[in-house]
Amino acid sequence: MPAFRGKQIADHLYAPNGASARSVDDFTTLSKKLREELKSANVRVGRSRRHHVAAASDGTAKLLLRLDDDRVVETVGIPATENGKNRLTACVSSQVGCPMRCTFCATGKGGFARNLAPHEIVDQVLALEEYFGQRVSNVVFMGMGEPLLNVPNVLKAHEALNKEIGIGARHITISTVGVRGSIEKLAHAQLQSVLAVSLHAPNQELRETIIPSAKVYPMEDLLQDCEQYFVATGRRVTFEYTLLGGINDQPEHAKELGRLLYARNLASHVNLIPYNPVDDSDYQRPSRATVYAFRDILEGLNVPASIRQTRGLEAAAACGQLRNAFQKNAIVGDLAPATT
């Protein structure tokens, strides 16, 4: 086919506001003859089915999508208004479940099934655009799964989000708890996106109790890889730090973390995340005063820090909870109505 047909097909695939194609028959700018030729060549177009929605009063919505093999995966849309402009952040999953089993995370409790294909990642963004009726402006790979255990597919999805849907690379964040050798792969890709490393502790001993994989990928090795990433890309590294009441949120922890990061050869920023309660977990959410005191100590040590605003708490507090509820008590029907 002529090259312009590719542009026509792309326009159908990534059309805004829920108008994206769900089958080859939806390529209405192509003649019926051309559509039949595509189908004869086994060209398939599909979308994950919206199985269930949990919506919060602040506008945040968590979608449970059923994939082609009947696996289910979560994606979250977070609307906001910044400087008079409406923003929509998509928190996307990269795996069905997660094998990392961080002790505070709901996703690992549901087990691990498989990696997501590029189109299954991109489709989460399209599903959120359809639900909210607006374009996604930011994407964070902070949903279910460990993105750096699925690097090839994450990079292909990143390319589609950036070049096809038009989301700026600097508005895309890839998060990781740390997988040996994978940060180097991201550095070679020379992305302009944000790397967010889930640290959650100021020292190796404490980190091992929170993140089991830290035993095979020690903190010192992880931070050295972050330094190399900064040298190779010039991009600041964000460190995610979930504050667990009485575990890693004390002033001595903040001082140790500040000194640790300030001494490294990188431009770092700490994103503090007050813990959101998860079923079957003994962890507690720290007090507001504790969270702000932790931030102030870091900034006093010349380490920039911010506190992530809690959104959608009543819509299932943590990643994986909606999927876990589905596994325990399956939702009946191919397309359940949204619940608010």
Image (cartoon, rainbow, N blue to C red):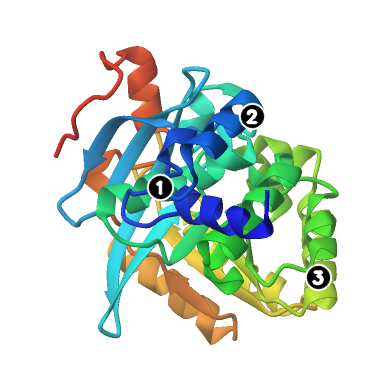
* Image quarter of residue 295: bottom left
Q: CA distance from mark 2 to mark 3?
A: 26 Å
Q: Which sits earlier in the primary sequence, circle 2 or circle 3?
A: 2
Please name the residue shown 34% across and 31% down the image: 322
Q: CA distance from mark 3 to mark 1?
A: 41 Å
Secondary structure state at the residue bearing disc 2 = loop
Q: Nearer the viewer, mark 3 or mark 1?
A: 1
Instruction: Determine crowd level at label 1: few under 14, some 14-19, many 20+ residues with C-alpha closer than 10 A.
Output: many
Please name the residue shown 31% across and 68% down the image: 289
Q: Nearer the viewer, mark 2 or mark 1?
A: 1
Q: Which sits earlier in the primary sequence, circle 2 or circle 1?
A: 1
Marks 2 and 1 close (CB-CB < 8 Å): no
Q: Where does the image place residue 89, in percent across and percent down from the top left?
A: 40, 61
Please name the residue shown 26% across and 36% down the image: 53
Q: Which residue, given by chain and number where applicable, does mark 3 sit on?
A: 227
- Look at the picture and state if 244 lies above or below 171: above
Q: Is residue 160 left or right of residue 165?
A: right
Instruction: Determine crowd level at label 3: few under 14, some 14-19, many 20+ residues with C-alpha closer than 10 A.
Output: some
* Image quarter of residue 3: bottom right
Q: Amino acid at mark 2?
A: Pro
Q: Amino acid at mark 3?
A: Glu
Q: Which residue, given by chain and number where applicable, does mark 2 sit on?
A: 99
Q: Is residue 258 left or right of residue 31?
A: right
Q: Which residue, given by chain and number where applicable, does mark 1 sit on?
A: 20
